[in-house]
Image (cartoon, coloured by chain):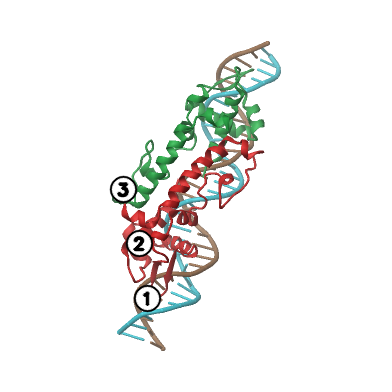
Chain colours: A green, B red, C cyan, D brown
Amino acid sequence: MLSRKTKYGIKALTFLAKSNAIDPIPISVIAKSENISQKFLESILLTLRKARVLSSKKGKGGGYYLLKKPEEIKIAEVYRALEGPIAMVPCVSLNFYEKCDDCPDENKCSVHSLMLQVRDNTLSILEKNTLADLIKM
Amino acid sequence: MLSRKTKYGIKALTFLAKSNAIDPIPISVIAKSENISQKFLESILLTLRKARVLSSKKGKGGGYYLLKKPEEIKIAEVYRALEGPIAMVPCVSLNFYEKCDDCPDENKCSVHSLMLQVRDNTLSILEKNTLADLIKM
DNA sequence: GTTTACTCTATAAAGTCTATAGGAATTATA
DNA sequence: TATAATTCCTATAGACTTTATAGAGTAAAC
């Protein structure tokens, strides 16, 4: 399951990409337009800012804006920042690898090989889709 | 993330498929071999039994056995029984569809279209892989 | 200096996952 | 028929995660 956090994050980014604004857009505007709790969205955008997807401007006339062009923002990057690993089990994760405690030999594990296939496919979709692709849809 | 429940379930089924036994195999044997808590595995196998993937024999000499040939058991079926929907958001689920409360129009939702791609790919992998494929690996 | 808006930390509430407990029911077999 | 082995079923505890909310702090504009 995709968490609301990630879902809202992608929606907010899509909104920013669509709006194509020069000036920063305040959280309140995004929250209202996308039906997201403003306080919750605050923490999400903060995460995306720390992940260098967004930047912000404080004070009056402030808000959030994309740090890169929509074509340059891969969904995989956003997903990892908000949701964490793309892999469904840590033992097939590229960026968040962990050994399974119950598994003596990964290469003989049926779940491992299966989830490797799933990861490869999901990853390729999230890597090839950018924010620019999402606003076309 | 794949839950331990599903992971253990697939491992247990793989064990049964590999063992190729005529007689039922007791939970205790599977649990020991796969490093799974026996009590936890009990509830998992019960779920798989209700999903008609497994059947069981009670009493002395009892245990669990596959209801179909490994080639006939799709991983998608197992996944749905243990983990639930394959889709990452309910609004793109085939078997567990639900409308999003925050989304006025699904067809215009960027997350929806993206997750549709992910679902299609994951689904095709889980549909084409059977237990028989898993024991080869 | 007032208003607007982001920043940061803490925490509450609800939900989910993992696992365990304990007893009931069933079967084989000595 | 008694015993041991095994599944069946329900309840529940404990830990963890998710989804927010609160409130005080910081910065910028005018």
Q: Using the image, tell me which numbered label, if any, was put on residue A71.
A: none
Q: Residues within 10 Å of mark 3 (few under 14, many from 20)?
A: some
- Name the amino acid type tagged 1: Lys
Chain letter belonging to callout 1? B
Q: Using the image, tell me which numbered label, if any, was put on residue A106.
A: 3
**On the image, numbered disc 1 is attached to which residue?**
B60
Mark 1 to mark 2: distance in Å? 22 Å
Q: Residues within 10 Å of mark 2 (few under 14, many from 20)?
A: many
Q: Please, what secondary structure does the residue beneath circle 1 have? A: loop
| Front one among B126 and A26 | B126
In the displayed structure, A92 sits above or below A9; it is: below
Chain letter belonging to callout 3? A
Q: Is residue A38 left or right of residue B73?
A: right
Q: Is residue D24 left or right of residue A68?
A: right
| Front one among B115 and A64 | B115
Q: Are marks 3 and 1 in contact (CB under 8 Å)?
A: no
Q: Position of residue B76 (x, y in %)?
A: 46, 53
Q: Position of residue B135 (x, y in %)?
A: 33, 56
Residue D2, image quadrant: bottom left
Q: Is residue D24 left or right of residue B79?
A: right
In the displayed structure, B55 sits above or below A28; it is: below
Q: Image quadrant for the N terminus of chain B? A: top left
**On the image, numbered disc 2 is attached to which residue?**
B17
